[in-house]
Amino acid sequence: MATSKDHAPGLPRPSAWVCRFAPLIPPGGAVLDLACGSGRHLRLLRAMGHPVTGVDRDISPLADLAHLPDVEMIEADLENGSPFPLEGRRFDCVIVTNYLHRPLLPRLPDLLSSGGLLLYETFAQGNERFGRPSNPNFLLAPGELLEAVRQQLQVVAYEQGEVWEPKRAMVQRLAARKMEEAQG
């Protein structure tokens, strides 16, 4: 099982939520990390044997991964109106942590292959009591994440509320699967 201890020194630890549900990703399944930042989840999942794709507007913190097999880095600003860099692609798992750009929410199910897993964790309303982010544009309303995927994905787990680790915050967390597509 993945643990938050499996990380590169000097980088933030992987999310405990991602570690908890990473074993549900099919062995060798392709993983996408949107707004991947320093690559903490890319590194973890690559170490678990998954080919990984990371998207961020600045991929310079990922330079040490660029030459590795089964690693794809895409430098793209997901918010500036540029064409979506992953149109038509499918992944066995899509990870989004500490990032919210509401226009992307409806696209997420389309990025998943049949049976694919969405792992999403970000800040929620009430977080302004604890610091950043405090802008309502970056804070989910109660139940918003759940409602965004309810019609297209099967919810495996959902949490909403205050956490103390890695820092005190208000969050919403979701693990959800794309329904298996009928064959035939």
Image (spheres, rainbow, N blue to C red):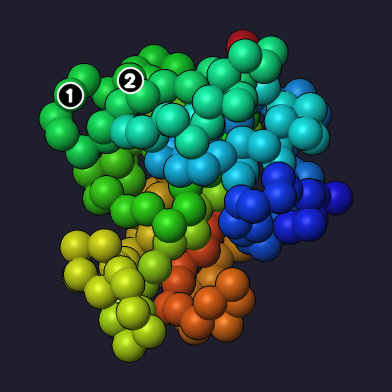
Check residue 175 in the rendering and tell me which mark sits there, or answer none. Answer: none
Secondary element under disc 2, as helix, strand or loop, is loop
Q: Which residue, given by chain and number where applicable, does mark 2 sit on? A: 85
Residue 117 x, y percent position in the rendering: 60, 41
Secondary element under disc 1, as helix, strand or loop, is loop
> Which one is in front, 147 or 111?
111
> Which one is in front, 151 or 20?
20
Q: Is residue 79 left or right of residue 172?
A: left
Quarter of the rendering containing residue 144: bottom left
Q: Residue furthest front?
A: 10
Identify the residue shown where x is 39% and y is 68%.
123
Q: Which residue, given by chain and number where applicable, does mark 1 sit on? A: 82
Whether tag 1 and tag 2 are in contact, CB under 8 A, the answer is yes
Q: Is residue 2 left or right of residue 35?
A: right
Q: As displayed, is residue 33 above or below residue 64?
A: below
Residue 135 x, y percent position in the rendering: 20, 70
Q: As displayed, is residue 176 above or below residue 31?
A: below
Using the numbered discs, state the Cα–Cα distance from disc 1 to disc 2 in whole angstroms.
Answer: 8 Å
Residue 51 x, y percent position in the rendering: 67, 22
